[in-house]
Amino acid sequence: MTGQLAFVESPVQLLNVLEWAHAQSPAAGDHVAPGGREVGAPVGAPLGGASAALTLVVLSPTDPMSRGQLRRMAQLARDDGFTVRWQEARDGRGSLFRTLRDLAPLLRAAERVIVGDPFSRYVQLLLTLFAPKQLTVVDDGTATMEYAAQLARGERLVRWHRRGSGRDPRELVLAPVSAAARRKLAPTRRRAVEIFTSLPVEPPPGTTVTPNTFAWTRARFGPPRLTRGADLVGTSLVETGVVDPDQYARAVADLARTHGATRYFAHRRESAEKLHRIAVETGLEIVRPDLPLELIARRGPIGRTVVSFPSTVVHTLPLALVGTGVKVAVCEIAPEWLKENASPRAQGFLAGVAGTAAFEVDRLTARATPAAERLEFG
């Protein structure tokens, strides 16, 4: 394999690029031993030819939590023999043009480009200027499901939680880029498109869907030590303007009481104010993971039950923790929890994420009362 270039903007994207590269390795297997470790792949073994053929470019974000996790993930990639290029793509005026200038030679030479977020304006601009012959889209949260659905329907690419008609001045300026990127992110007679995913997606016409089984994660970490209690997984639905903060805080408190949870694994985008409130009102220990949750859980220790709101982890954790005895549960988002100005698509999309979780995942049904939410197994 030659001329392969990956653009990542989040820790999860980088993780899934490593999973994709592992899946390309001839030595990679997906046979899981009873303890939950993959058989046939030495722990920590470099990926050989797969790593030598792929360059990872980190289009660094600005928030400290994402940057910290990305630096740790980048070191794991280097340990496996990858070339990692850290690009300060958002550090002020002139950074966009400097990034385009620096990356142009790599893009022109790339036969395949791997991206984690097809909705990213940065990625869309890069693909508009330099269209690869082969394109792979790896998971970046549940966005992959929406990308596949919009691609199949021939719609413009819009994040599911965005509200509005697209007439925002900034959106109007970027509309030509988005339209061009939509074409570059679609398969043609000259361009093959692959979706590498752990999520349940229907292949859009002309695309190939390759399953992500988290084989690299299982080979690299664990199996974990299990604690007696439960762990909760946080979400940034409040920060994205979808869920009411008071409703969310009450739901977290009820989940903690119901399942005897002691720890709350925060999403990297959750605000310090919200996390402080949760800690004070529930007594939960707030954990700021230094790596994606799949690796944290696999490394352990982790609760025997992990409860999450609708997010990618209800699909990925069962794969990463297969054979370990950990039970994953998903708490549905009640309609009453949504903010009045939330996108009309939010409830249906979140219900779809919860409803398509792996069959091993327990469903929790939320029933709202004026005082608090009562959560029961569905």
Image (spheres, rainbow, N blue to C red):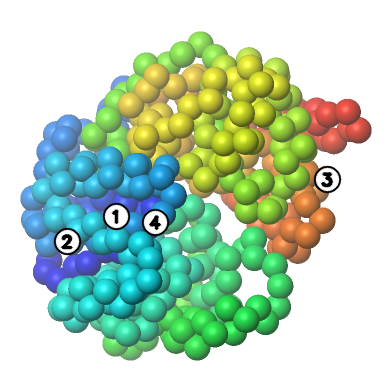
Q: Mark 4 sits on what residue?
A: 61
- Judged left or right of residue 283, residue 104 is left
Q: Label 2 to label 1, Cα distance in Å?
A: 10 Å
| Front residue (pair 98, 168) | 98
- Residue type at mark 2? Leu
Residue in view at x 16 percent, y 35 percent? 44
Q: Mark 1 sits on what residue?
A: 17
Q: Secondary structure at mark 3?
A: helix
Q: Label 4 to label 3, Cα distance in Å?
A: 33 Å
2 and 1 marks in contact (CB < 8 Å)? yes
- Judged left or right of residue 79, residue 231 is right
Residue in view at x 59 percent, y 84 percent? 172
- Residue type at mark 1? Val
Whether residue 85 is situated above or below residue 301 in the rendered picture: below
Q: Mark 2 sits on what residue?
A: 54
Residue 97 image point, x, y percent: 31, 78
Q: Secondary structure at mark 2?
A: strand
Q: Secondary structure at mark 4?
A: loop
Q: Label 2 to label 4, Cα distance in Å?
A: 21 Å
Residue 45 seen: yes
- Residue type at mark 4? Pro
Q: Mark 3 sits on what residue?
A: 336
